[in-house]
Image (cartoon, rainbow, N blue to C red):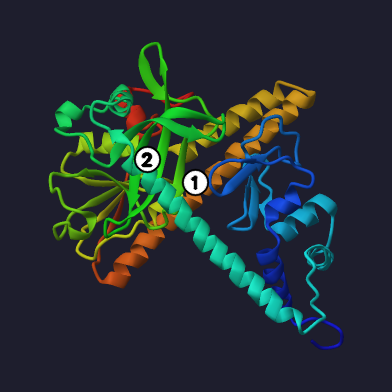
Amino acid sequence: MAGGQLDPRELQDRAARVRERVPISSVISRDVKLRDAGSREKTGLCPFHAEKRDGAFMVNDDKGIFQCFACGKGGDVFDYLKLRLGLSFMDALKELAEGAGIDFSSAAAKPELDGAAERRKRQSRADAAKRRADARDMWLTAHPGLGSPAQLYLEERGIDFAGLGHFPGSIRFRPDCYNGEVKAHLPAMVTSIVSLSGDFMAVHRTWLTQQRGSWIKAPLDKAKMVLGDFYTGSMSIWKGGQRKSLQDVAPGTRIAISEGIEDGLSAAMNAPDLYVRAAVSLDNSGNVALPPQAGDVILICQRDKEDRERRAARCRVLAMESWGEAAEDYLRQAAHHEHCARHIEGALERSIAKHQRGAASDGSGRAVRLAWPSEGYKDFNDELRGVRMEGA
């Protein structure tokens, strides 16, 4: 510290300590009613625009961030106070520190702050262990997927298991999977997420419902969610006839990575010799760990960016044809779709780069290839079912 100014490193340290001590949800919940939207996230009505239904505004205490996928605003607790109250970083730091009882002027406070940070880390580890245990219990007590509504749902999505020859053992079914959005137990397809070595990590849930005698995805804001931590993990969708774990695949085996289960199985129908893993999300596609003997990586892509751009363009046309609040609402929707399109483009670029770095690191020299559905179709499952994008 010189001339009354804090060293930038000390400022960063103080900010980090405040983030560790103050859950971001405790600050945002002062003026936003939040509800649970999964094991680690909360959602509510975005305070930065006239949102009528929650679901786009997300708060994550583990990461210490908020994000609105409609208006694009996001950041950490300091960003929130700057946007919401117009506070400077220093004013926000002072307010949060005082509210949490942190006295940076006292040398005696450092051990207490360090202790609080360590307790927070221990609690975070304990919470992660509980999520993993709950997920494992959910998976172990689920019914076999073969012959269940999970199979009927996937067959409604065009997956021909008779033609493929067998039903994936990673997919099971539960008639009573709790959903926090409706606060009720609903039927769900549950799929195990495992590490490279095959160790259980988390469970993926797709809530289902019956409509006119057919099993379909439940009409929820979030019909698919994960319980547990799945970074570097993936779902075993199809083994290309090898019957080997990912860690033990034959040298040169091509590994196809899809975002979701339905798309992965659709790709397997097109090429039954593929070894297919589902990454849960596009963001995790680049994190999926692969063995050094694996061959080329094939990222099974979706035309979500194009679909979002089409939706944005349509919303802007509707905005021009409307006025007042309706026009503003269409413009917000357009901005949301454009934000999502940029995120999708960036996520794909990051996934490609991560696998390229992985190939350079393990010396495999594997190539990263992209597989796209035909023009006019958002993904391979839509193409399988003949469902074209709106306006395509």
Q: Position of residue 186 (x, y in %)?
A: 45, 28
Label 1 neighbour load within 10 Å: few <14, some 14-19, many 20+: many
Label 2 neighbour load within 10 Å: few <14, some 14-19, many 20+: many
Residue 373 in view = no
For image coordinates 29% across by 59% down, the residue present is 196
Q: What kind of residue is marked 2?
A: Gly
Q: Is residue 188 left or right of residue 255?
A: right
Asked which quadrant contains residue 43, the reply is top right
For image coordinates 25% across by 66% down, the residue present is 365
Q: Residue furthest top?
A: 212
Q: Position of residue 134 (x, y in %)?
A: 43, 47
How far is the residue under mark 2 from the one under mark 1? 15 Å
Judging depth in this view, the residue of 368 and 87 nearest the camera is 87
Badge 2 marks a residue whose secondary structure is: loop
Q: Position of residue 33 (x, y in %)?
A: 73, 40
For image coordinates 79% across by 87% down, the residue present is 1
Q: What kind of residue is marked 1?
A: Ile
Can you tell which mark lies on residue 344?
Answer: 1
Can you tell which mark lies on residue 109?
Answer: none
Q: Which residue is mark 2?
A: 260
